[in-house]
Image (tube, rainbow, N blue to C red):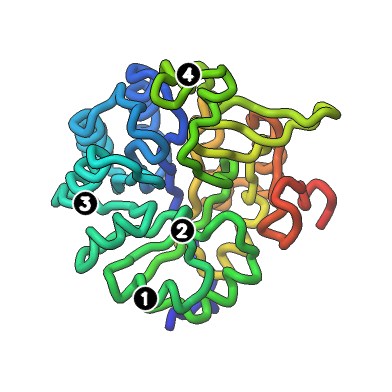
Amino acid sequence: MSDTNAARTPRLSLGPISYYWPKEDVERFYAEMADAPVDIVYLGETICSKRNQLRYEDWLAIAERLEAAGKEVVLSTLSLLEAESELLRLRAICDNGRYLVEANDMGAVGLLQGRPFVVGHSVNVYNDRTLALLANQGCKRWVLPVELTHETLAQMQQARPAGVETEVLAYGRLPLAYSARCFTARARNLPKDDCRYACIDYPDGLVLSTQDDNRFLALNGIQTQSASTLDLLSELPRMRELGVDIVRISPQSNGMGQVVELFHRAIAGEMAPEDASKRLALLMPTGPCDGYWHGAAGMDAQREAGV
């Protein structure tokens, strides 16, 4: 069992890019992040294999540059596999022999058995028994599913297997669901097989609104996200108390240097988390949410409500 009684200073990680950005934008982004105060960088396509402006070799070249800049690099896998070509790419990632791999589905977990790996938030680790099973297969780090509460996290931390790190997504649009259908293509009346790479036109996803003009969801190819951006920066003191090892932020198309800096300053004690969180709100495409963490509706902003 892990000792979660002592507060600790978590490391800062940058999750994989969820959206389809042009190759030059991706390379420019990671050139900036090489100099940013993040400890861990996750790389790779996790949504759709048709997003192929960057090939596997391109991701490895970016990984080498980030590693040379002192970052820990992790290669992330697709969250939903549908074709033999995707399985071939998955095998190549799992067998890369150099970088730790984030498994985002159980197929990847199966291929990685016996080697250390990270379990992504799209794998349903909802209780300590599942986490113990994965630890026996080689899991060295798990990412809390975004729909779980801090109370559930506290319970799981008490029974967390020794040698397993805990990572929590603290900033970014919530990844809610994955489907065999491409919702972005459907919004343009295009079939999935002839999507014309429509999602490259939406660098932060395609936002949907309700009839009363409430921004509700964001479409990101086969993935559905929240329109609002998760913000748990003000919860940093609680995460320390719970023994969270790594705090993750998810990339967006603008302002990521500022987002990283605010998290870094709060983690380093140079800025109060509440003050940093207020500044974060100015950088979000839509606005904040944190409901799941508090056991409420995911789209709710409990911190703003004073909860």
Residue 95's mark?
none
Left or right for 180, reference 71: right
Mark number, residue 198 = 4
Q: Name the front one of labels 2 and 3.
A: 3
In three-dimensional space, the C-alpha distance between marks 1 and 2, rounded to whole angstroms, equals 15 Å
Give the residue at mark 2. Answer: 143
Dot 3 corresponds to which residue? Answer: 94
The crowd level at tag 2 (other Cα within 10 Å; few <14, some 14-19, many 20+) is many
Task: State the residue position of label 1.
Answer: 133
Residue 80: give x, y in percent of width and height: 40, 46
Numbered disc 1: secondary structure: helix
Amino acid tagged 4: Ala
**Disc 2 element:** strand
Does dot 4 land on a helix, a strand or a loop? helix
Residues at badges 3 and 4 in contact (C-beta under 8 Å)? Answer: no
Looking at the picture, does residue 188 appear above or below residue 120? above
Q: Is residue 300 above or below residue 9?
A: above
